[in-house]
Image (spheres, helix red, strand yellow):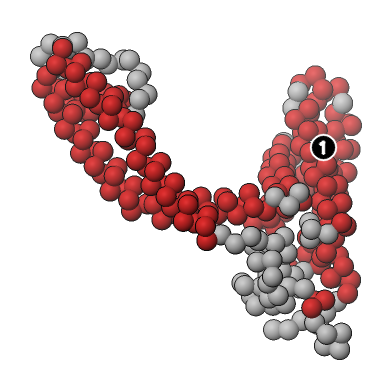
Amino acid sequence: MAFPRNRSKERLHEIIFEADTPAGKRFDIILLIMILLSVFAVMLESVPTLGTGFKKTFYVLEWIFTIFFTLEYIFRLYSVYKPIKYATSFFGIIDLASILPTYLSIFFPGSQSLIVIRALRLMRVFRIFKMINFLNHGKVISDALKNSRPKIIIFMSFVVVIVCIFGSLMYFIEGGYNEQFDSIPRAMYWAIVTMTTVGYGDISPTTNFGQFIAAVIMLLGYAVIAVPTGIVTSELTKSDSDMAKKSLQTCRYCSREGHDNDALYCKYCSELLNEESLPDDI
């Protein structure tokens, strides 16, 4: 469905959503300062002496911050062509959740302490300072872990088998001489702690052969750490080589990000990303 272009919406959207424009960067910096101040105020209010001595001041400040963020949320809804898309997006939900506690405190005293959720909005700093690649790399890590899952499951299954074998072996070796190894499950617990190099020290072998087996398990522990790391690193290399540099452009229709720098249309809803690329007579 095509929406008629609205110049006021376009301009407001550029200021509020686009961090790669001067006006957008200024707005987001002001927004981040307000978020930091509001979170800082909540933290100070939780200090008994300050909360009691400056109760009225904190109350006024909280409503100032809440009104500011409420207006910002309304402007965000107005500046997009499909407000429901923004309202149900990750940042849309966080923005709404950051202002609700103050209004709820009118009916449920004490709920205003939940406004520390505003700290989550600091994630916008990645957009402001053109650090979108940090978010892209986060997606790369997520994809690498997902692609590594079959190999890691197989490897961990092998580790479980090794733990069962060494646990049973240590129970056979130490069971008659060391009361700490009083069952196979307890011996398996010792094997896991030793193999993962945690080493609590609550259980330890006393026989020479048992200590030799312990040394073998300690050496295997390095493989337990190294192998999954190597698997994930391999997948990270593949994902990173395929990752294209993304722009900070936000779709005015579906509020999604992560488009290629040369993209003209949104890859999620197929709408035009930049209305300036259209002829003036359209």
Which residue is farthest bottom? 281
Tell me residue 207's x, y (percent). Answer: 15, 11
Residue at image position (35%, 20%) is: 199
Q: Quadrant of residue 173?
A: top left
Name the spot of residue 263 as percent of width and height, x first: 68, 72
Picture layout, residue 155 above or below residue 13: above
Left or right: 156 in relation to 180: right
Q: Residue at x 31, y 30 (%)?
A: 221
Picture quarter with the C terminus: bottom right
Q: Is residue 168 above or below residue 206?
A: below
Q: Which residue is more in the foreground, 130 or 164?
A: 130
Picture residue at 16% right of the left edge, 22% below the top: 170
Quadrant of residue 84 within the rendered picture: bottom right
Give residue 34's position: percent from left, percent from top.
Answer: 83, 43
Q: Quadrant of residue 230?
A: top left
**Disc 1 target residue:** 37
Rendering coords of residue 102 (x, y %)? 77, 44
280 with respect to 198 (left or right): right
**Residue toward you, 166 or 116:** 166
Question: Which residue is at 78% across, 29% downward?
Answer: 45
- Could one spot residue 212 in this view of the protein? yes
Please count the marks in the image.
1
* Residue 73 makes an appearance in the image: no
Q: Nearer the viewer, residue 116 or 243?
A: 243
Q: Amino acid at mark 1?
A: Leu
Residue at disc 1, secondary structure: helix
How crowded is the residue under tag 1: few (<14 C-alpha within 10 Å), some, or many (20+)? some
Location of the N terminus by quadrant is bottom right
